[in-house]
Image (cartoon, rainbow, N blue to C red):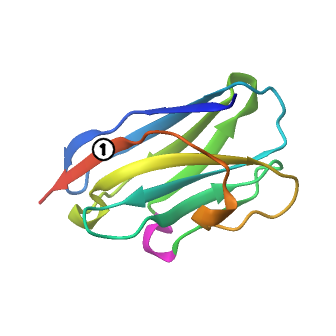
Amino acid sequence: QVQLVESGGGSVQAGGSLRLSCVASGYTSRDYCMAWFRQAPGKEREGVAVIDSDSNTAYAQFVKGRFTISRDNAKNTLYLQMNSLKPEDTAMYFCAARLWVGLCPLAPEFFDYWGQGTQVTVSS
């Protein structure tokens, strides 16, 4: 049973930084595509960043240059470094995973496993 547990959320002022972590358990293979999504109240879940098994990355346009996704396979951990945060970044952030080798789309329907989320609140 794959489990994903996020941490690192919190409240920051605009311009601040946070680093989210997602620890995966229940598998040891590095052949997982992993991603971060977010959902604000009243809005649909949207993709933030994705990283494949070869650590190739892709980002949503609205976070390019501000957020960095990375993974540590030895620790089974996914990260999201968020800099220059804006009030519009306020949302619940979720990590997601799917056993997959190759390019990974940043689309929620592609992923099989989800964490319960960590809240990020950015004040102006």
Residue 86 sits above or below residue 98 on the image = below
Instruction: State the residue lying farthest toward the right.
Output: 101
Residue of label 1: 119
Is residue 111 visible in the rendered image? The answer is: yes
- In front: 64, or 47? 47
Please give the name of the residue rendered at 55% of the width and 40% of the height, measured from the top-left corner.
79
Please give the name of the residue rendered at 67% of the width and 46% of the height, measured from the top-left corner.
97
Q: Judge the density around disc 1: few (<14), some (14-19), many (≥20) Cα neighbours within 10 Å.
A: some
Is residue 29 rendered magenta in the image? no
10 left or right, relative to 70: left
Q: Secondary structure at mark 1?
A: strand
Residue 121 sits above or below residue 40 on the image = above
Give the percent coordinates (x, y) of residue 122: 21, 53
- In front: 85, or 9? 9
Magenta stretch in the rendered image: 61-65
88 left or right, relative to 124: right
Q: Amino acid at mark 1?
A: Gln
- Prevailing secondary structure class for the magenta stretch in the rendered image: helix
Give the percent coordinates (x, y) of residue 114: 56, 44
Quadrant where the N terminus sits is top right
Rendered image quadrant of residue 70:
top right
9 left or right, relative to 113: left
Please give the name of the residue rendered at 68% of the width and 31% of the height, measured from the top-left corner.
2
Quadrant where the C terminus sits is bottom left
Instruction: State the residue lying farthest toward the left.
Output: 124
79 left or right, relative to 57: left
Is residue 82 visible in the rendered image? The answer is: no
Residue 78 sits above or below residue 87 on the image = above
Rendered image quadrant of residue 85:
bottom left
